[in-house]
Amino acid sequence: MAPASLQVIFLGTTTLYLSDGETHLLTNGFFTRPPLTQMLFGRLAPSRERIGQALQRAGIQQVDALLVGHSHYDHALDCAEVCRQTGAVLAGSVSTLNIGRGAGLPEERLYLANAGSIFSWGKFRVTFLPWKHSFPRFYPGEIVTPLVPPVPVSAYREGGTFALFIEHPAGSLLILESAGILPGALKGIRTRAVLLAVAGFPRLPAGRERLFREAVLNTGAQRVFPIHHDHFFLPLDNPPVLLPGSRAVMDWLERRCRQEGIGFEVLPPWERTALF
């Protein structure tokens, strides 16, 4: 890897591994992916085996920081166990840190993020920006005490939602792991790439256009990568399957990007892709 390059591996839903060869960041780290019936009627807990297998297949041995945008199970279920297996610190809301506490992570490895919090790891500078969860908002509220799995899906409260703005000498990127809209939250943000959630994308044309303008046009993005489009009730090692409705959203995004002269690319799972 060239010293100035920044690479990403897409690992399903909103799990992204970012590396410049010296420092390594991971978002969410959701690998267990319990089936729909278990999510609806059972209790959830991280699978150490599935997490270890996924990290090994992706070639991930060390992570400096694990960044969590909100605390629903499909983002944060595995965060503490991933930190345990990779040595990462955990950065996120009070709710996210209570998932870490429930798993026994020490306080010195828990980094509390509030709206506007900035952290630096190596050459990466990460800003947690306030953002809005897509509609409908499942399980709002906070996780107020250490969460010890197995627990029902409703225990994974949203805990507020962040957008992640990641700056690096090679280039900047914006990760929107939820397709809500918070007007003005991205004011002043300029980025080369946007990684944009498809799940929960606005259905009405006016809402779609508004989100596209806020996230892509107003930030000056040159490349758009869809995320959170895969069927996360299926194991990660299955061939990728799109969530219902994802194809229509991705077709719309590709068409709008083409109209604006912006690159639109779907990240292949498990493969290293050069962002910059």
Image (cartoon, helix red, strand yellow):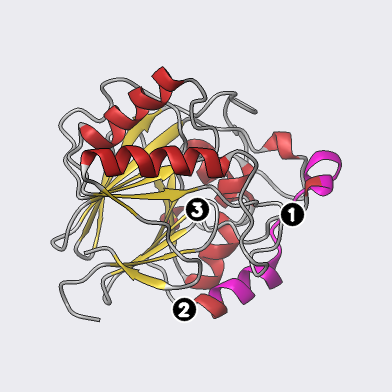
Provide residue 144's location: percent of width, then percent of height: 59, 32
Verify whether residue 50 appears in magenta: yes
Please determine whether, in this image, residue 246 is positioned above or below residue 79: above
Instruction: Name the residue: 64% across, 67% down.
Output: 239
Provide residue 17's location: percent of width, then percent of height: 41, 64
Which residue is under mark 3?
28
Instruction: Name the residue: 60% across, 38% down.
Output: 245
Query: N-terminal of the two: label 3 or label 2?
Result: 3
Circle number at residue 61? 2
**Which residue occupies the foreground of this view, 64 or 190?**
190
Provide residue 214's location: percent of width, then percent of height: 28, 28
Which residues make up the magenta segment? Answer: 37-55
Drawn side of residue 223 relative to residue 60, left or right = left
Query: N-terminal of the two: label 2 or label 1?
Result: 1
Which residue is under mark 1?
34
The answer to whether residue 137 shows anywhere in this view is: yes
Query: N-terminal of the two: label 3 or label 1?
Result: 3
- Mark 3 vs 2: CB contact within 8 A: no
In the rendered structure, which amino acid carries the disc numbered 2?
A: Gln
